[in-house]
Amino acid sequence: MSDLKKKILTTNLGNPVYEDQASITAGESGPTLLQDTHLIEKLAHFDRERIPERVVHAKGTGAHGYFEVTHDVSRFTRAAFLSEIGKRTDLFVRFSTVGGEKGSADSARDPRGFAVKFYTEEGNFDMVGNNTPVFFIRDAIKFPDFIHTQKRHPARHTQNPDMMWDFLSLTPESIHQVTILFSDRGTPKSFRHMDGHSSHTYMWYNQAGEYYWIKWHFKADLGFQTLTREEATELAGKNPDSATKDLYDSIAQGDYPSWTVYVQIMPPEEAKNYKFDPFDITKVWYHADYPLIPVGKMVLNRNPENFFAEVEQAAFSPGNFVPGIAASPDRMLQGRLFSYPDTQRHRLGPNFHQIPINAPKAAKANSYQRDGFMAIDGNGGASPNYYPNSFGGPAPDPQFAPPPVDVAGMVSRHPYVLSDIDFVQAGELYRRVMSDQDRANLVSNICDSLGQAQQRIQLRQTALFYKADPDYGQKVAEGLGLDLAAVKDLAAMSQEERVKATQA
Ligand code: HEM
């Protein structure tokens, strides 16, 4: 290779480096000199290599791919990327576990994050969902407390069954998600073998200004395959990065995972009289009432070239909408709309949207936001930095306005009142959807975890299983060696009485 073609090591500012194996010292055995700016640059940059991990969903991996429309849904949404059959949009997906740190095991019992960034010609649209169609709580104000119970005990610094089951048993609306999480669906075989759901309800609106409530569902073409507790535990020890490796290897080998994408669509007038609040994320809409309507296909066909640049720095938000898609009144979702860009300003800096993985690709951003740490996109150059202006700066266009939604009511902290309907879907899942083997594994998985909590907490939680389905409660009580009569008594009480009867 000629000298001209040879790649020369440089400093970060491009200055050629003549030696990279020895620091500058005063004599052969003397101390290192401050004038070794190359050494200082290396050490100082290394000292700052870590950024805060995501406060939840810290462990995960991602891949690039595309979405292709297979069915016409243009009468429901004006979103340009959904406008015609055959249309393709580039996307980036990140899958994750929720509670564990960056180094934790991929096969842990946990929901899996399922976050998709569509690079559309109307800017980026993010679908930030999970592999479960429901969630543990239905008000954002409970989220920090819930997550604390999933993380480490403040003194012991270990995960703590007392914390977790205390919170869940004091939060009975979690029963549906708890039943999914402790089934083998809580330990998917890999990221390729699981479905994704928006869980929340969102709004779709069309060109005529008509709107609908919708939920997204991504069905894995490989089918939802799971691990037993024993398999998941063994894998956690043998290969904590099992799902990360599986996704990378399969894409590298040309075995591209894909998902068929559906929506459920509810006309707004039906939302008012549905069997339950359709914005309550602890419940699924029955497929018999709102069948899955096919929309398209998602294929992952390209691995990241650099994990930190593309996966660690990726920033998804359920509030990244395009015209045709908007928020619903779901109060969990409303909290999320704030939380994601807020944490990203902390985790990545105020200009996180300029990082290539987060920047729009098929559209151009034209805002009046300026300055801040790491403004690297030219910062608007000499163009006006205020609006309104008469110098030809970008202006809002009313044609993109979502339809107005009728809302009225008293401003207050309105609690969701717990009712029997909150136990129905967990019971149906146990009785109607699960096989005998599924039920046996569910009960065994629950007993393995709940059995480590204090007995009064075991009783309180088992009463909730009993309320969902008597056989469910009875089997857990038997597995834990609890007094069934006491469980039945607790199940017959109101939640307030139950909490009182099981205080420390
Ligand atoms: C990540 C907050 C509920 C799915 C995160 C992050 C925060 C957060 C702060 C870290 C984001 C980042 O650092 O980039 C919340 C709050 C919730 C909530 C406050 C409730 C009020 C949910 C629900 C779902 C969900 C219900 C699914 C339906 C995700 C996913 C990620 C995530 C998939 C990882 C995104 C990625 O891969 O970068 N959440 N979350 N979250 N959340 Fe939530």
Image (spheres, rainbow, N blue to C red):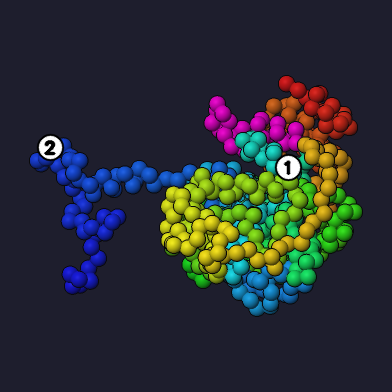
Horizontal relation, residue 398 to residue 93: left or right? right
Label 1: which residue?
139
The structure residue drawn at horizontal position 52% and vertical position 55%, both measured from the top left corner, is: 369
Residue at the left extreme?
A: 27
Asked whether mark 2 lies closer than 8 Å to ligand 1, one says: no
Locate residue 188, reporting x and y percent: 63, 54
Horizontal relation, residue 51 to residue 173: left or right? left
10 Å crowding of disc 1: few (<14), some (14-19), many (20+): some
The answer to which of marks 1 and 2 sits earlier in the sequence is 2
- Relative to 143, does residue 114 appear above or below in the rendering? below
Horizontal relation, residue 381 to residue 167: left or right? left
**Magenta segment includes 163:** yes
Of residues 429 and 274, the one nearer the viewer is: 274
Label 2: which residue?
30
Q: Which mark is residue 95?
A: none
Q: In what element is the residue under mark 2?
A: loop
Of residues 174 and 437, the one nearer the viewer is: 174
Quadrant location, the C terminus: top right
- Relative to 163, does residue 264 appear above or below in the rendering? below
Locate residue 262, reporting x and y percent: 72, 66
